[in-house]
Image (cartoon, grey):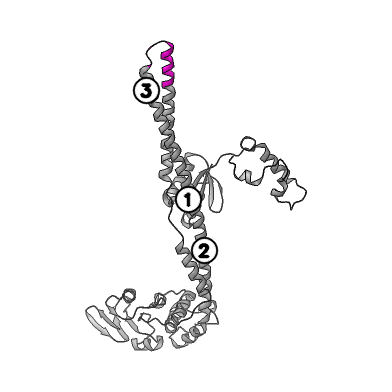
Amino acid sequence: MLLVIGYSQAARQTLRNVCNAHSETVIRRFGRAALFAETEMGAFLALRAREKHGESVQVERTKPFNEYENVPKAVREAAIAYEKRDAKSTPYRAFAANTDHPAPESMEGTEL
Amino acid sequence: MRLLYRGVQYAGPAIELVGADPDALAARVREGHGIDCPTPTPAHGYVGCITPETSLPLRAALAAAARTRGYAAPEDDEIAAMREEIEGIDTETVDLRALRERVAETGIAETELRERVARLGGEVEARRDIGTDVEEAETELRAAATELSEAETEHLAARQALRSARERAREQRNEREHERRLADRADNLRRRARRTLAADVYGEFAAALESVPTTDAVRAGTEPSEYAGDDVSAALAVARLADLRAPVVVACGRFRSAREARRALDCQVIRVQNSA
């Protein structure tokens, strides 16, 4: 999908207008952003918005997220284990210390 | 004031004109064009020209009038500090378009060269297999490989340039978000300041209403939201209340003479009489 974000008042207004006029291409709309279908029409609408407002309109391409393809097992398991923790007040850093779960710094520094 | 109008010189604090365009006259007052008078204060923008069609945002006009009388709002310092901060924000934007295009172009060039190298490599092998001369094909292959490695370098450089430009763009968006929030807050403060200032002079405004020709039904109440009356009456009272410095153009049919208007509004006046 195409994620289109408006960073100025005018860009957001354009985005709202596009969303109202092209419901078949707009998959979801948020406050100042919208997801367009990844079709030529979606790209056409995103490019028109960018042509009008320059870099006040950001366009990104989203990819489906499959944790079994994209995320190391250790990270998946850490998420599950942490959500099952006994003490809700334990911060993740303390939870992960002295275990096999990855440290926050190592996750922050590692791209998927 | 001294006014040159249609080739005639007028002078004095109360001038009578017939058949003139009030808006054009008020514009001349603001621009100092063909008229010799002090520079108007901002309140003049609200009540510098009073005609039957005048529509007045009362609170804003009262706040502007209060400013001309030296009133200040408690929000002023904060508003000024915010304006300074907003002005200091770097509003330059990175244009990523050329960089995106460069990444795409160098990527295509790289792919084409990689295919060419593979094809030439196959050709060299095939020639070797059947025992024919490979020298020419090998020279071509070497040249293509060199080009490919240059293209790879270029593509990588283009991608790195785009990546760092995107990071700069992200920072700038954060800056702009910050600027927008500041501007919203400054707007809120300005509205609050306007309310305060309007309230500060509302008593004087109510008193001024007593001294200007109003329609019978006008009632001031105790705050701007309670004002019940027409905009022309309110504009006349604001004109009386404010220190406009420059002359007011009145073409509202409520005064018998420019001198009467001058007395009622307590400022210099150009009174326009239109037959319509």
Sequence-earlier tag: 2 or 3 = 3
Read off the residue under disc 1. Answer: B169
Check if residue B173 falls in the magenta segment.
Answer: no
| Crowd tier of the residue under label 1, counting other residues whose Cα lies within 10 Å: few below 14, some 14–19, many 20 or above | many
Sequence-earlier tag: 1 or 3 = 3
Q: Chain of mark 1?
A: B
The disc at residue B140 is 3
Q: Chain of mark 3?
A: B
Read off the residue under disc 2. Answer: B182
Extreme residue in the right direction: A86
**Amino acid type indicated by mark 2:** Leu
Q: Secondary structure at mark 2?
A: helix
Extreme residue in the top direction: B131
The span from disc 1 to disc 2 (Cα, nearest Å) is 20 Å
Part of the protein shown in magenta: B120-134
- The quadrant in which residue B247 appears is bottom left
Residue B17 place in picture, x, y as percent? 29, 82
